[in-house]
Image: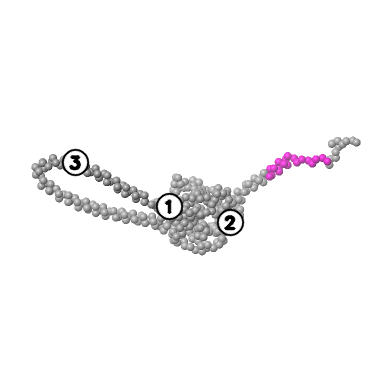
Amino acid sequence: MPTLVASQLPSSAAPPPRPSWRALAGLTLAVALAHVLLLDLAPTAIGPDPSPLANKFITRTIVIAPPAAEKPAAPAAAPPVAQAKPPPPAKPRRPREPSRPRPVAPPPEPVPQPAPEPQVSEQPPAPPAQTPDLTAQNATDSGAAPPEQAASAPAGAVLGGAGSTANTGVGNGPPGEAAGAANAAAGNVVGPEALRIPGSVKLAFAVTGQQGASPMQGVFGDLVWLQDGSSYDARLSLKFLFRTIRSQHSTGRIGPTGIEPARFSESRKGEVASHFLRDQGQIMFSNNAPSVPLLPGAQDRLSVVMQLGGMLAGDPGRYPAGSRISIQTAGPREAGVWVFNIEGEEQMSVPAGDYAVRKLTRSPRREFDDKIEIWLAPALGYLPVRMKQTQPNGDFADMQLRESLPAGPSS
């Protein structure tokens, strides 16, 4: 039987052709481009990077107790010890007395010989003339002392009446932000009674407003507050669909005076930031604007909301209706003293429900200042349930609470 050579096999039994290397290279390039496109769109769709505190946050409230009252018991015990030491120096004075009579013994003989003794009797009238002058001087000195004490008393009254909480110049002091700045610059600072810094939380807001001729629609806001007991990270974001159109970011630490910012930034088309250089006592800005002195208790435009809530939560009775709170507040380009007027309790309905609230208003001080209104709910630990910002041209953004959620790694 003849054998079939490979070349004689029918064409249908031949192996299928292999794809060319050009086709494989084109397919690989298409897959790579698809991955690059997805990675490029991810930041705008997802939003800003997560906070470094997302994995170590805590949800408990931090209570900052007031500084302990001064106890001068230890220094008071020192003076009596100093008074017990003077008796030993009195002993050496006794041996000096016998030394005095020795020189007195030889001169008695020459003393009776001279006759100028009657002249000595003429000198006594001089001392009585000096004694009234000394009493007159004492009288004038005693009369000058009371006015000095009276002048210092009103100064103490000013410190007490315009005292500040958390080193911010708080109380029923003189009206106006200029007066608040003067008090803060003069060092009129009184320690806080107590603060309650809220635990980590996420607040979701529904946003309405007006921007130019068109109303603001389809915008949502998120305020994420994270803290681990010593440091904090706060971010306020406004989103349209899945895109972040504006955000504010504040980071820093939690200290004896409450929230102490280290950096604040605001992002729209680009990012601008302010830096709190506490070792230098300055606030510096990334846009090369002139730096300003850092006053005690300074906040930024985002942290000030949480600090105000912590102050009212720590001692609500300290802030009755009509009182004011003055705080140096820094933005990304400038800093100034903001004065918040506190109103009484009222009822408010927001998408999250009905709440009793305390309203704080920062009225415009200059021509281009914004009006800031904040409503804090005692039932939520004085967290904000509504925030409204109105610009001089009439544009505004009104954020009303939709829900309060525990913060977590996904926040």
Nearer to us: label 2 or label 1: 1
Tell me residue 374's x, y (percent).
50, 58
* Label 3 sits on residue: 99
- Report if residue 78 lies within the magenta region: no
Query: How would you rate the neighbour count of disc 2 (Cα within 10 Å): few for under 14, some for 14-19, many for 20 or more?
Result: some
Q: Amino acid at mark 3?
A: Ser
* Disc nearer the start of the sequence (2/1): 1
The reply to whether residue 153 is in sight is: yes
The Cα atoms of the two marked residues, 2 and 3, are separated by 101 Å
Query: How would you rate the neighbour count of disc 1 (Cα within 10 Å): few for under 14, some for 14-19, many for 20 or more?
Result: few
Q: What's the mark number on residue 67?
A: 1
Q: Amino acid at mark 1?
A: Pro
Q: Main secondary structure of the magenta part?
A: helix
* Disc nearer the start of the sequence (1/3): 1
The range drawn in magenta is: 13-31
* Label 2 sits on residue: 219
Q: Residue 400 is drawn in which quadrant? A: bottom right
Disc 2 element: strand
- In-front residue for pair 16/353: 353
